[in-house]
């Protein structure tokens, strides 16, 4: 992991602004979710634009150019077009001509899925330097009349550069990604989905969610997968320096912090300012905490996410 970056659209929509046109309140949203505001893309500002800006910042921090990259894995549930992959548009704008670029779709777990994919490409020698991006414009698939969903999400992008170069050492002291863990269970497809698509309705559709059900699954599945990640490296939760969780609900994040025995200052929180940016939430949080010097080289970082599918996963990294 040699550089990360984030990008948020300029426009901020506060809870108060939503409360002025919906039956909701700042108090309800903040208490139930921890959200105070979200960023929303400008008309004509696309997922690929957000992804490009985040990728450029990550490459700058890594001291690399687009032409140094031979793999882009872009996680999104809100691509610019049904096809081609948004990743190929970003590839062209970055001036990357070698290797390949493609999208992965695992909704809010998308960044963990993309990270696992890129890591496996690198471990197999199929890529040397990869850009892993999570980018979303969820504002485009929200039903802005539905207070149970539209207050929860925001737009944004985050990116991370992975390099095949690893420090000597090995084992749990090795720097870089230690392990990734992915799961899905399609029997819960309909508790979090979009009610449209090219094959079903021919329209884009809107996000629909049974919030309470999703909440229940999130708490259990995330607890299981973080245990799996720690067990794979034979590391106790006490060895963690940072939890960088998916930012869906402050209560889910706090319950994970308590489960791991982590003090609140070791948990990276962005939900208050970003809301849930789906696949962008983990890399945006990572970019913020690395950028402001909280996450330092050699520290142990646990990332986790759960989303539609259902899909969920975790990644353990020595920064
Ligand atoms: O990133 C993918 C994963 N997503 C998640 O993990 C999200 C998981 N779910 C959640 O975060 C929570 O379930 C929500 C924040 C979505 C909802 O919180 P909740 O505590 O589960 O509330 P609820 O759905 O049980 O609703 C409680 C009440 C209801 O009213 P009644 O039936 O008790 O009269 C809702 O109609 O709150 C009402 N309500 C609202 N009130 C004001 C729902 N949305 C709103 C709102 N403003 N925006």
Image (cartoon, rainbow, N blue to C red):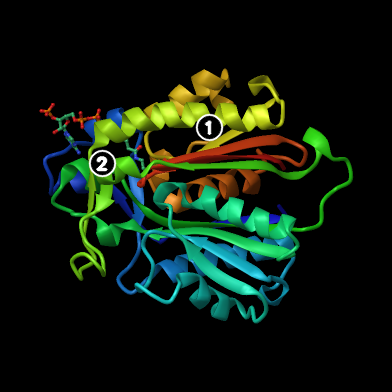
Residue 245 in sight here: yes
Classify mark 1: helix, strand or loop. helix
Gap between marks 2 and 1, in whole Å? 20 Å
Of residues 190 and 270, which is closer to you in this image? 190
Q: 43 and 299: which one is in front? A: 299
Residue at left 84%, top 40%? 170
Task: Check disc 2 and report its element: helix, strand or loop.
Answer: helix
The residue singled out by tag 1 in the image is: 225
Q: Residue at left 21%, top 61%?
A: 196
Horizontal arrangement in the rendering, residue 174 relative to residue 223 (left or right): right
Work out which quarter of the rendered image holds the C terminus and state it. top right
Q: Which residue is mark 2?
A: 191
Q: Position of residue 92 (x, y in %)?
A: 56, 80
Foreground: 218 or 63? 218
Q: Position of residue 223 (x, y in %)?
A: 49, 26
Which residue lies at the image location 31% right of the left edge and 35% below the top edge?
Answer: 214
Place of residue 108 in the rendered image (x, y in percent of width and height, measured from the top left): 42, 48
Q: Which x, y percent locates residue 245? A: 51, 37
């Amino acid at each position: 992991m040699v550089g990360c970056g984030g990008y948020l659209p300029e426009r901020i929509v506060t809870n108060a602004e939503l409360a002025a046109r919906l039956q909701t309140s700042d108090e309800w949203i903040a208490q139930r979710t921890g959200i105070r505001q979200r960023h929303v893309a400008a008309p004509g500002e696309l997922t690929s634009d957000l992804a490009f800006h985040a990728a450029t910042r990550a490459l700058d921090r890594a001291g690399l150019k687009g032409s140094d990259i031979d793999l882009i894995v872009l996680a999104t549930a809100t691509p610019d077009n049904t096809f081609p992959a948004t990743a190929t548009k970003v590839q062209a704008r970055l001036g990357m001509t070698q290797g390949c670029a493609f999208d992965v779709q695992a909704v809010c777990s998308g960044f963990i899925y993309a990270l696992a994919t890129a890591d496996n490409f690198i471990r197999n020698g199929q890529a040397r330097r990869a850009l892993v991006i999570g980018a979303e414009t969820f504002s485009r698939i929200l039903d802005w009349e539905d207070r149970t969903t539209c207050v929860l999400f925001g737009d944004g992008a985050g990116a991370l550069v992975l390099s095949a170069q690893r420090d000597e050492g090995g084992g749990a002291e090795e720097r870089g990604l230690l392990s990734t863990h992915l799961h899905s269970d399609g029997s819960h497809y309909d508790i979090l989905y979009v009610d449209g698509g090219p094959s079903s309705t021919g329209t884009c559709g809107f996000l629909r969610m049974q919030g309470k059900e999703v909440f229940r699954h999130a708490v259990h599945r995330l607890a299981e997968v973080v245990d799996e990640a720690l067990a794979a490296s034979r590391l106790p939760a006490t060895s963690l320096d940072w939890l960088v969780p998916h930012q869906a609900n402050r209560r889910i994040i706090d319950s994970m912090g308590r489960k791991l025995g982590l003090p609140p200052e070791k948990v990276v929180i962005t939900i208050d300012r970003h809301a849930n940016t789906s696949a962008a939430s983990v890399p945006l949080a990572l970019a913020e905490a690395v950028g402001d010097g909280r996450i330092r080289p050699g520290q142990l970082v646990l990332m986790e996410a759960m989303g539609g599918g259902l899909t969920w996963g975790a990644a353990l990294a020595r920064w």
